[in-house]
Structures are given as C-alpha cells and as structure tokens.
Image: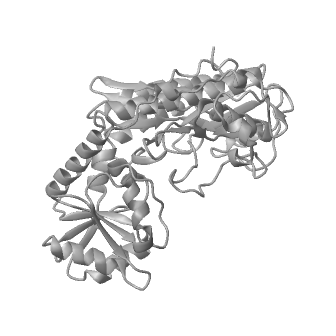
C-alpha cells in the first residue's frame, strides 16, 4: 500500500523518516551489487542483508518487438474508440510504448501517435540529439525553439494527418496547463481522455511483464525476510532505511520501504514520528522495488518476539480476508466484488461495518506504476480480465492500539488469481 507517486519522477517522495538514509547518501562502495562492506553510513548490516545476491541473471528486458505490438494495439484501440491520435508526455506510458525514459517539466517533450503510421516526437530543439539517442520507433522528430509554441507544432502535425478538426486523446497524466495549451492551438478539434487506449494496453500484462514483476516481488520478499531476521530491540527506522538501501543495492535494484511500529501501525500510511522497535510490538513494513521499470508492493506485519492474543486473532482475520479476495478475483468478476469478499470476512469477525476498521480499498492495479488502473473498491463494477495485476491488501486498524495489513500482489489468469509471493504465515513468524 505504498504512498509512492510516479516512479519516473526523479523527485518522488520517500516514505521513511526525514532523517532516514537514502541510497544517494550511502558511500559509493556500498552501492555495487555484492559489495563486501559490512556497514551503511555507520549502521551495521546484518548477515542476512549481506547474504543477498544480485538478480541480474533473472532479468529479461522487454523487447522492441513487444513494444511494436503495444503501439499497434494502441492504434487498434484508437480506431475502436474514435480517436485520430493520442498525445503522451514524458513518463511511464511513453516508456511503456517506446522504451524512452523522459521526465515531465514545463518544456513540452512528448509523442503524438496517429491512428495509423509512425509516431511523431515533439521536443525542444536543444534536446533533439538526446531524444534521438532513445528513439527506436519512427524518426519523425519535430523541434521547437524557446520562443516558439510547441502546441502550434502539435496542431500542425494533426493537420498533416488530416485530423486538425478531429479527436485527440490526451494521456491522463499530461499536466492541465499542457492540455489547455493544446486545446487553444486546436480550437476546432476535440480533446478526450486517452485512458481507454493507455489503460486498455497497460492493464493487461504480457508474460514478459509478469516475469519482471515476479523478480521484483521475489526481491522485495527476500529483503523483508532479511530485515526480519536481523531485527533487534531498540532499532529505529534509520537502521531499517540503511538496510533497505544496502539490501536492494546488493541485488542490483532500486527500492524503498516504510516502517511503522506499535500504535503507528494503526495508521494505514503510518507516521513520520520517530519510532523504535520493542519486543512484542507490531512492526509494519511496506513498499517495493523496480525491475526494468516494473514494480512490487508488499506489506508484512509482524512482531519481534511474542504477540498478544488479540494481535494473533486480528492477524488471522486479515489473513483469511486476503485469501477470500484471492479466491474472488477471476475473469468476469466485478472489481468491487473482490473488495466485498475481503470486507465481509473482516466485518463478520466484528471489525465493521464498512470502513470503520478496514479503512481503505482492498487493492490497486500495479505494473510500471505502483498504483495504476484499476481499483478493487466498492462502486467499481468493471469486470476483471485475464492478465490484470492487483495488490491484495486487507487490513484492520485499531486506533491507539495497533494495525495489521497483509499485502501481496496477484496476477489473474484464465483460471483465477495467483499471488506472486507466498502469503505471510503468522504474526510471529511471517516467513516460516
């Protein structure tokens, strides 16, 4: 249930204490996979973190052939939904279709994909050579100088396509000022959301995408287990932050995690208050990593030592709710029904009604963005399709006491849903 935002944004927020050690703060020697250093920023690394190994040999990148198929599918969907072209800004969706890794700023750089033919790239003139380094599909690159309007350039391309008065789909993450600029340059055209195209492609994962997500999920679970094995009373979030950065670096990955302890686990997204781990208090570890742009999102709640009977009981209820959601997720099922299946278990156990103790939706889509289409939530009747991936993360949060959330990502096949990672076993021994 990470609170992370767009993974492509270089300034994305880290959800650890403001004093936590980030990867950029660690000595360079620590950041090489398999580094022999036993400390991170003065914090000792446990043997379990030091035992983590690189995962590079398990990674098979997305091929250009697959991206060509994605572009073709986008064009097929554009025809189905009555769009003459779609516009994408720099960011995750541009990466998905083209492999280009660009950011969004006040300067427009993006791609116009017509319903037929090759994509057209719009870029500041001084960025042309850098754009060409990454462009692999089509060579039509239009440039604009700082004293010129990139919106007029988009309008010109649309006229060349015979669609100056047609329908242009706008990717949902395009900034509002950009959309209004495009609209002003094309007053006779109609601008519509491009979500039916972008989500129509991205929400259905290929076997290659699932394989990358599997590596990411395996890596996150391995890191969590290593952290659990190394925990000792009195440790703080700074210790865990250093272990997370060092552990992922040893595997050759980027990732992050939030940790909350005791009464702060009753807050679904925790707190920035300083917290120390004590015997018998619940610990909630949440977040994930990136593998070739694909993400994991896992939460584990456990105690260091013995848990109270109430903690064990709440854990067991949440575990059953997570299983009920998995069983309910299959092709043709309404997305809201998966949320309802988990919520019924929790409500029937006395932790209801509604959102009183289970205070958030059951899950979100996941892939190249940690939170993407679609959501497992009451009021969403959309049907699940084979190839979709979601988080499965029920929780019970008792204000002033503690909370339990269990989160694993699941992928839906023709015969139902499966988790990428094994379910947590118990609150005292989550990894067996």
| Vertical relation: 356 (above or below) 148 | above
Q: Position of residue 343 (x, y in %)?
A: 48, 35
Q: Quadrant of the N terminus?
A: top right
- Residue 148's x, y, as percent? 38, 84
Horizontal arrangement in the rendering, residue 170 relative to residue 310 (left or right): left
- Residue 426 visible, this orientation: yes
In front of the other: 253 or 32: 32
Residue 70 in the image: x percent, y percent?
Answer: 26, 46
Q: Nearer the viewer, residue 179 or 267?
A: 179
Answer left or right for 369 relative to 38: left
Tell me which residue sits at (85%, 28%) in the image.
233
In terms of depth relative to the viewer, which is nearer, 354 or 137? 137
The answer to whether residue 413 is left or right of residue 232 is: left
Residue positioned 47% across, 64% down in the render: 104
Q: Is residue 401 visible?
A: no
Judged from this view, the residue extending furthest toward the bottom is 147
The residue at 75%/38% (across/down) is: 242
Quarter placement of the C terminus: top right
Residue 5 in the image: x percent, y percent?
54, 53
Color scheme of the displayed model = one colour
């Amino acid at each position: 249930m990470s609170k992370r935002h767009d993974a492509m944004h270089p300034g994305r927020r880290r959800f650890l204490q403001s004093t936590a050690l980030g990867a950029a703060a660690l000595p360079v020697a620590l950041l090489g996979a398999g580094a022999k250093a036993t400390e991170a920023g003065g914090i000792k690394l446990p043997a379990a973190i030091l035992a983590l190994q690189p995962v590079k040999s398990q990674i098979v990148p997305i091929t250009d052939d697959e991206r060509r198929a994605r572009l073709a599918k986008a064009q097929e969907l554009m025809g189905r939904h009555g769009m003459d072209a779609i516009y994408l800004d720099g960011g995750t969706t541009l990466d998905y279709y083209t492999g280009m890794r660009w950011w969004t700023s006040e300067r427009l750089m993006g791609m116009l994909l017509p319903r037929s033919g090759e994509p057209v790239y719009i870029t500041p003139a001084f960025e042309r050579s850098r754009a060409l380094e990454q462009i692999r599909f089509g060579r039509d690159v239009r440039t604009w100088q700082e004293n010129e309007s990139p919106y007029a350039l988009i309008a010109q391309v649309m006229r060349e396509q015979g669609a100056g008065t047609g329908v242009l789909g706008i990717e949902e993450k395009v900034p509002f000022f950009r959309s209004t600029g495009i609209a002003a340059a094309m007053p006779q055209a109609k601008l519509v959301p491009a979500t039916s195209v972008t989500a129509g492609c991205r929400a259905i994962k290929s076997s290659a995408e699932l394989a990358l997500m599997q590596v990411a999920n395996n890596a996150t679970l391995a890191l969590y287990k290593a952290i659990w094995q190394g925990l000792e009373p009195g440790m703080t979030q700074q210790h865990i932050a250093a272990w997370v950065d060092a552990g992922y670096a040893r595997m050759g990955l980027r990732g992050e995690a939030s940790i909350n302890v005791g009464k702060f686990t009753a807050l679904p997204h925790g707190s920035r208050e300083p917290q120390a781990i004590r015997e018998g208090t619940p610990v909630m570890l949440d977040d994930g990593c990136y593998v070739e742009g694909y993400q994991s999102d896992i939460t584990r709640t456990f105690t260091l030592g013995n848990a109270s009977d109430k903690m064990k009981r709440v854990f067991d209820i949440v575990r059953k709710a997570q299983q009920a959601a998995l069983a309910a997720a299959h092709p043709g099922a309404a997305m809201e029904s998966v949320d309802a299946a988990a919520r019924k278990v929790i409500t029937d156990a006395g932790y209801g009604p509604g959102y009183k103790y289970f205070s958030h939706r059951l899950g979100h889509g996941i892939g190249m963005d940690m939170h993407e289409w679609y959501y497992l939530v009451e009021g969403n009747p959309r049907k699940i399709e084979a190839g979709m991936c979601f988080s499965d993360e029920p929780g019970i949060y008792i204000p002033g006491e503690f909370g339990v959330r269990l989160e694993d990502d699941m992928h839906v096949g023709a015969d139902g849903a499966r988790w990428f990672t094994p379910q947590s076993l118990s609150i005292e021994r989550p990894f067996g």
